[in-house]
Amino acid sequence: MTPLNNNDRLKKYAAISSISVAILLTICKFVAFIKTDSLAVFSSFIDSLTDLFASLISYIAVYFSLKPASCNHRYGYGKSEALSALLQAIFVGASGVFVIFDGINRLFNPVEIVDTSIGIYIMIFSIFSTIMLVVFQTYVANKTNSLAIKADRAHYTVDFLTNSTVIISLVLVRIFGFVYFDVIAALFISAYLLYNAYDLAKESIEQITDKELSEEIRENIIKTVKMCDDVSGIHDLRTRSVGDVYYIELHLEINGLFSLKKAHDISYNVETKILEVYPNSQIIIHQDPYGVEEERLDNKFDNGCLI
């Protein structure tokens, strides 16, 4: 088995850490809900339950994404991360809808909130645990650009906000005895869950459907290529990302009188320059004689493409 590099190890550790924290917080919040019967605590418990599910999915996705390419999967298994993020988004969205319906029911059938102290203490503990995990996940996400870890971090960032909201709700209920504070907090958390689910689903679908890399990255690739020696032009640039790997394809325009060896050397130099800017990339370069008229991919799209 191929040994893991530093980034791959970081992704694995981050996935394991998130599962451990999710199990701990789910148990704690379930106890808090039983003791308080607070809908806000219940919504936070549901949120942690989704975090546990999401973390398990992320771990499976990271496991598959780290598998080396094979004869039947020559691009590797990187898209498993995007698929896991989409599944997480669906689960989080469904959980948000569930809590909203329960919240609406409690608006018409209020439930007395009891023993708020234990709920407050558990939510404070949850906040500190979540902060430590999010800091570590942010470090890993910045290092690896892993969509699975980013998706997991998004869950726990929301968890931090929900825990804070629940504490405020429990304090207000304790001081004023107004149970509707609890319902309002739960509805707020649910709305944020739905927003987060939409954002996560959008990013994962973009990667699954091979959306082009950002315009800034594409322009930087074009600039890098044009600065290379003996390059006359570039067209039919195509880009996409799979996990934390960029896939770049382009047609390189060079002097048609150059020998095959010379054309290869120019292409190799272009590939090296791109890798200096985007190290974790897979690059395919096709050489074209400069000035030759041919049907181009750039001209096949509805609005045309400059490159």
Image (cartoon, rainbow, N blue to C red):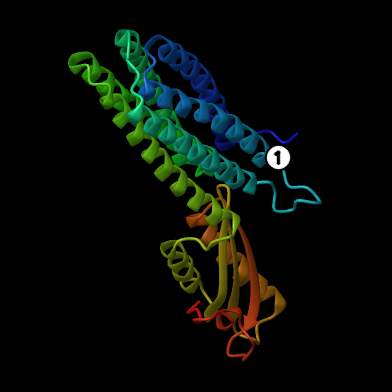
Residue pictured at 61% horizontal, 69% vertical: 267
Give how far across and how far down residue 191 sits, in percent. Answer: 37, 40
Residue 139 visible to an observer of this rendering: no
Give how far across and how far down residue 14 sits, in percent. Answer: 52, 29
The residue tagged 1 is 67
Is 208 situated left or right of 106 in this image?
right
Give how far across and how far down residue 91 sits, in percent. Answer: 54, 38
User: Is 15 drawn above or below residue 75 in the view shown?
Assistant: above
Quarter assignment of residue 156 = top left
User: Is 185 drawn above or below residue 216 in the view shown?
Assistant: above
Which amino acid lies under the numbered mark 1 shown in the image of this protein?
Answer: Lys
Image quarter of the N terminus: top right
Residue pictured at 47% horizontal, 15% vertical: 30
Give how far across and how far down residue 93 sits, in percent. Answer: 48, 41
User: Is 219 drawn above or below residue 183 in the view shown?
Assistant: below
Count residues near mark 1 (Cα–Cα under 10 Å), then give few for <14, some for 14-19, many for 20+: some
- Judging depth in this view, the residue of 21 and 142 nearest the camera is 21
Quarter assignment of residue 297 = bottom right
User: Is 116 drawn above or below residue 50 in the view shown?
Assistant: above
- Judging depth in this view, the residue of 237 and 186 nearest the camera is 186
